[in-house]
Image: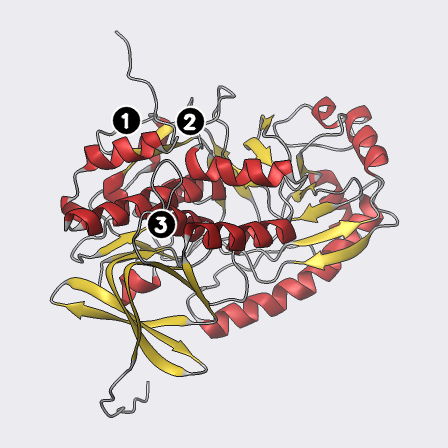
Amino acid sequence: MKEIEIPATRIPVRDEVDVLVVGGGPAGLMAAQAAAITPDGSRSGLKVMLIESRGTLGGNMTQGLPLLGFLGRKGNEVIKGLPLRFVERLRERGQATHHRACPLHVSLTMIDPEGTKRLAWEIMEEAGVKVLMYVFCADVIKEGNTVKGVIIESKKGREAILAKTVVDCTGDGDVAYRAGAPMAYGNEKGIAQPPTLMFSMRGVDSRKLRDAVADHPDIYDIDFIPNEFFRASDNCTMVGFRNQIRQAREQGYDIPVERTIFMTGMADDEWWVNMSRVNGVDATDPEQYTRGEEICIRQNAEIARYLKAFIPGFEHAYVDRVAPFMGIRESRRIVGEYVLTEQDIFDCARFPDAIGVASYPVDLHHPVGGDCTLMWCPDCYDVPYRSLVPKAVDGLLCAGRNISATHLALASVRVMGPAMCLGEAAGKAAQLCVRTGAQPRTLDVEKLQQELKAEGVYFRPAETE
């Protein structure tokens, strides 16, 4: 590749803060709030800043996706603390549903994307978090192996933000990558799970759809879940209809996946569709990301045509909204002090440095081909603090889908419920690092656990003899 040399320049310092959170998605929101408040909800007194490259807060919570993972396999709430408070505030406004137990996805919680954006801003204002939008993390500032801040890029040019502790919630591990932390990507062949561009359809005759599926399991095949489950007017994701996809392909339809996947929205006639797919896209490469968006737009037009022709209740439906960006399931992830494995998930692993639990299945959208695989743990598993701490770099914590996990383990812990839980843990850890002068890898984890418990985070009870 051809290269050029850029002369050394002096970069102005825009701000100096105690905790800097990079990325305003589900993990980043919780990290910023946790760093800025004490367990009783009062302000911590630290200067906390959140930066985001897009024009809204909420990330994947603004795409029409349900929040997954708030309940465990036993039906109990396993995601609590700040994430649960967030959902409860939405529910008070009629902008979130209850947590419905689901045989396939364990639990589903529907949220209103626009209400989520508004509440995210309110929470940042209440906590005293300074928010800066439309800026990218272009580089990091380091002293030796310690991150001391980041270089941001915007229409104003390059500027520096100095911080005592940085939390990487970019999803792509942008800060960790630029800091030189060891990174992993995708499966053993370096291929990540494919992205999807969500869209919603309105005008769906939901009663016709529900009754047709419940009454005719011989016609409408549903993965894992008894068809009768869908008769009730309640949260659900319908996954299956493989017979209908086969029939559509025989008639010349070009469908990129093996299963039809759509889920309830907040309105009675609203369903969100999760079916576009572009294999092999590296979300950290803008050219590939651009191509993926273009392909998904074309795929979604064909998918909508298919739904109207083959799925009962969709005959008069129309496309209402399209997500603002592709949902990325996987890209870069750190190699941390501990790498969470799929065996940890299946064994319901316990760790002495647990900072939260997760119960969502290993939900792998195949990097090659158009199918998915789900594998469940019997109950729930701990996520260790060490998986948030990158090797070889100090002054930095990571939360969300860029944590230290194997390809398969990430397919479970990546979803928004666990991501929010890990964000809260990283933000609270960053606050403690600033208060005690500790580096993230030397932080007193027992003190962190005490703070998280005081904030309402769920920890599994000790095993009995």
Mark 2, secondary structure of its residue: loop
Q: Which mark is residue 350?
A: 1
Mark 1, secondary structure of its residue: loop
The residue wearing badge 2 is: 377
Q: Residue furthest top?
A: 465
Mark positioned earlier in the residue sequence (1 or 2): 1
Q: Residue furthest left?
A: 144
The quadrant of the image that shows the C terminus is: top left
Q: Nearer the viewer, residue 454 or 427?
A: 454
Q: Amino acid at mark 1?
A: Arg
Along the horizontal axis of the image, is 360 left or right of 234?
left
Q: Looking at the picture, how far across and down is residue 176, in whole percent?
A: 28, 61
Along the horizontal axis of the image, is 379 left or right of 279?
left
Q: Nearer the viewer, residue 433 or 329?
A: 433
Q: Looking at the picture, how far across and down is residue 332, in whole percent?
A: 36, 58
Mark 3, secondary structure of its residue: helix
The residue wearing badge 3 is: 36
Q: Looking at the picture, how far across and down is residue 51, in whole percent?
A: 41, 64
